[in-house]
């Protein structure tokens, strides 16, 4: 594991972020790389930085996305219980929780990311508070639950997330998932074959 | 060629439409399908229907797109001379010209589409008037040049394009390229493997 980690940028609100999360560790391990998991918030990037509207409020594209997500889940046999329409639970608390666990237990970042994603998209569970996160996703073994709850309420987790969002924007990330390999960004779960080839060949 | 044609929706202004155009006929032929080429105008779809801003005026995404397009061209060895920045020649006349040729010479629609795309993106030539189209892309052998110039100025070509744009929007098309196989839409040149599998298996 001498080479730099792959940077994986995602929002828990993003279904294609979920699909990518299910594959990223295996992809990285195949090339002797680790993964640096970086949550960000599409609400900030898309609306405030890019000046666009949320994708599920965008005519034509929202219909397509709904169909495309369900087609992907069928093809890959992925559990996918949550619909894209109607009230979408915000991903803010999930992202804060991930940042806190990653900061204090970096070797648990993949496990925590997958637990949150599987609860949110795979089982359509709400992650709208620290208590719901404990109940629905849980914490990896060995993570201090009292310290977690403290960090989720005393501003520590939110400060960590703000820093994660800022660094995603500074890296030019605008969509979820984005994978950055040695400075080269790839947007979209459908670019994993390119990521794989870039890792194998060193780029073109 | 008994099955329905594949519907290929594209804007000549779209570099990924160009990349897709270079592959779509071969992909269809492999499955004994023909291709129905349908130009539309992203300017109408993106700005008027979807309420977004042009992609090259969108922060973060415009930088990524520029890098992604050039990366694709290098990987696939595609001629690509036109930059994405600065003054982009509009695709209106190219789209009108394609609609006119397709209407009167349907078996030349692929040849005309490729000639326009290769002039525009492969050689960075201007296609901003009927005369420039004749000089830079040319017409397929046997196409009546005087009738073409007449149709480009008497409103026929523009009416055909309006109809093509309307039918793209009615089909839910919002991005270039979009390929529709038996009612199933696939957005993006990076989805050609899915299109291929859908054609081979009949879907999932």
Image (spheres, coloured by chain):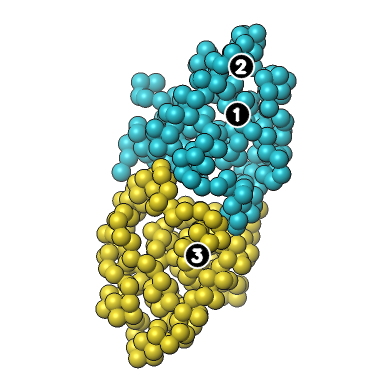
Chain colours: A cyan, B yellow
Mark 1–mark 2 CB contact (< 8 Å): no
Of mark 1 and mark 2, the one earlier in the sequence is 1
Q: State the mark number for residue A92.
A: 1
Instruction: Report how far apart the C-alphas of labels 3 and 2 lie in the structure.
Output: 45 Å
* Disc 1 and disc 3 on one polypeptide chain: no
- In the rendered image, residue A127, in percent from the top left (x then y), is placed at 68, 27
Query: How many marks do you count on the picture?
Result: 3
Q: Which residue is mark 3?
A: B44
Residue shown at 27%/68% (left/top)?
A: B125
Q: Chain of mark 3?
A: B
Which residue corresponds to the image point at 57% horizontal and 41% vertical from the top-left?
A: A16
Q: Give the quarter of the figure containing the N terminus of chain A.
A: top left
Which residue lies at the image location 52% right of the left edge and 29% below the top edge?
A: A39
Where A65 sits versus A6, above or below? Answer: below
Q: Chain of mark 2?
A: A
Q: Which mark is residue A152?
A: 2
Could you tell me residue B189's position as x and y percent?
46, 56
Residue B25 visible? The answer is yes
**Does the CB distance between marks 1 and 3 fall below 8 Å?**
no
């Amino acid at each position: 594991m001498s080479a730099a980690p792959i940077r994986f940028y995602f929002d828990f609100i993003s279904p294609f972020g979920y699909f990518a999360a299910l594959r990223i560790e295996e992809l990285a391990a195949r090339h002797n790389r680790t993964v640096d998991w970086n949550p960000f918030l599409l609400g900030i990037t898309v609306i405030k930085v890019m000046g666009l509207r949320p994708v599920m409020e965008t005519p034509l594209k929202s219909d397509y996305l709904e169909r495309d997500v369900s087609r992907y889940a069928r093809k890959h046999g992925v559990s996918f219980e949550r619909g894209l329409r109607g009230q979408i639970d915000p991903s803010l608390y999930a992202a804060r929780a991930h940042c806190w666990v990653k900061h204090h237990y970096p070797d648990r970042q993949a496990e925590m990311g997958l637990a949150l994603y599987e609860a949110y998209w795979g089982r359509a569970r709400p992650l709208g508070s620290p208590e719901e996160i404990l109940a629905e996703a849980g914490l990896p073994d060995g993570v201090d639950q009292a310290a977690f709850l403290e960090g989720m309420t005393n501003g520590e987790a939110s400060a960590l997330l703000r820093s994660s969002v800022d660094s995603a924007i500074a890296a030019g990330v605008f969509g979820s998932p984005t994978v950055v390999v040695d400075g080269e960004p790839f947007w979209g779960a459908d670019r994993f074959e390119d990521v794989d080839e870039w890792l194998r060949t060193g780029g073109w």
